[in-house]
Amino acid sequence: MMNSLPFFQGTDSFIFDTFTPSLDHITMPQTRCSGTIRMILGFICMLGLPWLSWSQVGIGTNSPSGRLEVVGAGSSATTSALKVGNALGTILTVRDDGQVEISSTTRGFVLPRMSVTQRNTIASPTVGSVIFNTTSNTLNIYFSGAWQQLNTSLPSGAITSLTAGSSAGTLVTGLPASGVSNTYTYTGGNGESNGGQIVASSGVTGLTATLTAGALAEGSGSLTYNITGTPASAGTASFAISVGGQSTTLVRTVASGEVASLTVGTANGTLADAVAASGVTSLINYTGGNGGPHSGQTVSSTGVTGLTASLSAGNFATGSGTVTYNITGTPASAGTASFAINIGGKTVTLTRTVTYQTEVTFTYRGASVTYGVVLGANNRLWMDRNLGASRVATNSTDFSGFGDLFQWGRGDDGHQSVTWTSSTAATGTATTTTLSSTDNPGNSNFILSPSADWRSPANDNLWQGIGSTNNVCPSGWRLPTRTEWETERASWSATNASGAFASPLKLPASGRRYNGPTGSIPAGGAIDKGGDTGYYWSSTTFGTAAIFSRFNGSSMGTLYEYRGAGFAVRCIKE
């Protein structure tokens, strides 16, 4: 029976020594074997070693104290007693100076993991024993006769500067935020966790900025705050940003409903002077709508007044769309009504044409009458006949178009009534020489006034506009001023009675009623100049007299006359 096996010593050659396999250990050479020796050893092991029964192995020692003992050659920190690795490199190194190094850039060192119950079943733990407690997710170390929990908190993430970077998305009041974020760049990152942050907005409320927890870069890097929620109003939303020991304020503008452009679209319904608008609308087209809300608009007309365009509050479409303005009110005149549209941050002028009133119905001398309306100079509206005329004059001497003759400032009390039988013959109401002390004499007599006025004392405020005392024209109408008469006459084709009749107003030579005393020439209360001269009151006073417009076959002009005289009245639209 073989009683010994070779003992290898050296690197490149065999030096035989013997050892007894029945011993409790096998010792190996202290120096590494060459490749050839390793091959031979491997072959021997294949043939004979399987039947051996070894209980201890020593490397670098002839007296292993355990199943395997590796002893270094010295105490240097630059040499190793043992290295364990894989195809990627060395994992475990035991240095000759006693230091143990575990190397990896992709994995961590895993301690024994156990619950509190399992930990407490360890019999007589060695001081310094370390385990990972899976119950509390903490590191535990045994000392002072008990298991102690270690503070396993990592240092906080820290940076040295924080600078606002890019922003994405837009915020619109009333609309949920989508794809909205802000990026910050930083320097001096320490590689630890940023801790994350969730911060609510101030100013404009309803929003939240969220930074997801994660590791900071070592050095420079960037952080992204995602903004969610629905802004409660338009304005500025602010977020108090605090990360890595640095603070700043994130500011985002919240827009109201906005558009890129406005254009005037389809007009529906018609507008006529002095007629209440009904079913009148105008569409305003827009592009670039952001889907946000608008508060609507109410805007009054200019040019032609009396109208209002109203848009109800609502939301713009995303992209292109239309909004509808409803137009209400009663146009004060014919012409162009303009509305300053201002919606979604853009402006445009909406214009609507107001056609002139074609007729007016009112009560005169106790009966309902309807007169036509004509358009005079400067787009001013006039009645088509004198007050009291039964028709529009067909020529300058048509007495059916002469109408009644008023004393200046008196109301529709019957004193003005004249019955024409021809262009030169007419009968008026009874006369009196009793002057009135009030604005309304209380009778229908034509007052003869040697003092020039039917009223004593005179009242200059009569006939002064549509709201004045004794205004004989219907609502919204009044006597023309001196200037308005002169403007109208300037448009005539001739400066005489022919020009007056050829004008849109078709003014006849309607004559006058004299207010002199009985026995004067002509006699007080007499009606004359019919078919020859036209006398038309204005609302303008001149001392104790009043201004009138006059024309005849050869001339026309502006003159003044005592207020007791009887002249024709032609009403103009306010």
Image (cartoon, rainbow, N blue to C red):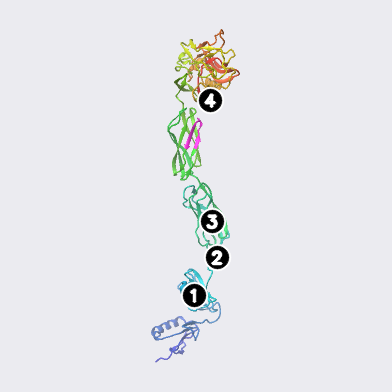
Crowdedness near tag 3: few (<14), some (14–19) or many (≥20) residues, C-alpha within 10 Å: some
- The label on residue 184 is 3
Query: Counting residues from the N terminus, which is met first, the one under dot 2 or under dot 4?
Result: 2
Type of the residue with mark 3: Tyr
Q: CA distance from mark 3 to mark 2?
A: 22 Å
Query: Is 385 colored magenta in this rendering?
Result: no
Task: Provide the secondary structure element on which disc 1 rests.
Answer: strand
Does residue 303 show up magenta in the picture?
A: yes
Image coordinates for residue 551, horizontal then vertical, percent: 53, 15
Q: Earlier in the sequence, mark 1 or mark 2?
A: 1
* Residue on which disc 2 sits: 155
Q: Residues within 10 Å of mark 4 (few under 14, many from 20)?
A: few
Cα–Cα span, label 4 and label 1: 110 Å
Cα–Cα span, label 3 and label 1:
42 Å
* Mark 2 closeness class: few <14, some 14–19, many ≥20 residues within 10 Å: few
Residue 491 x, y percent position in the rendering? 52, 21
Q: Earlier in the sequence, mark 4 or mark 1?
A: 1
Residue wearing tag 1: 92
Q: Secondary structure at mark 4?
A: loop
Q: Nearer the viewer, mark 3 or mark 4?
A: 4
Q: Which residue is mark 4?
A: 467
- What separation in Å lies between label 1 and label 2 (alpha carbons)? 28 Å
**Rendered residue at 54%/57% (across/down):** 185
The residue range painted magenta reads: 298-310
User: Disc 4 residue type?
Assistant: Gly
Of callouts 3 and 4, which one flags the residue occurring earlier in the amino acid sequence? 3
Q: CA distance from mark 3 to mark 4?
A: 70 Å
**The residue tagged with tag 2: helix, strand or loop?**
loop
**Which one is closest to the eye, mark 4 or mark 1?**
4
* Of labels 3 and 1, the one closer to you: 3
Mainly helix, strand or loop, the magenta region?
A: strand
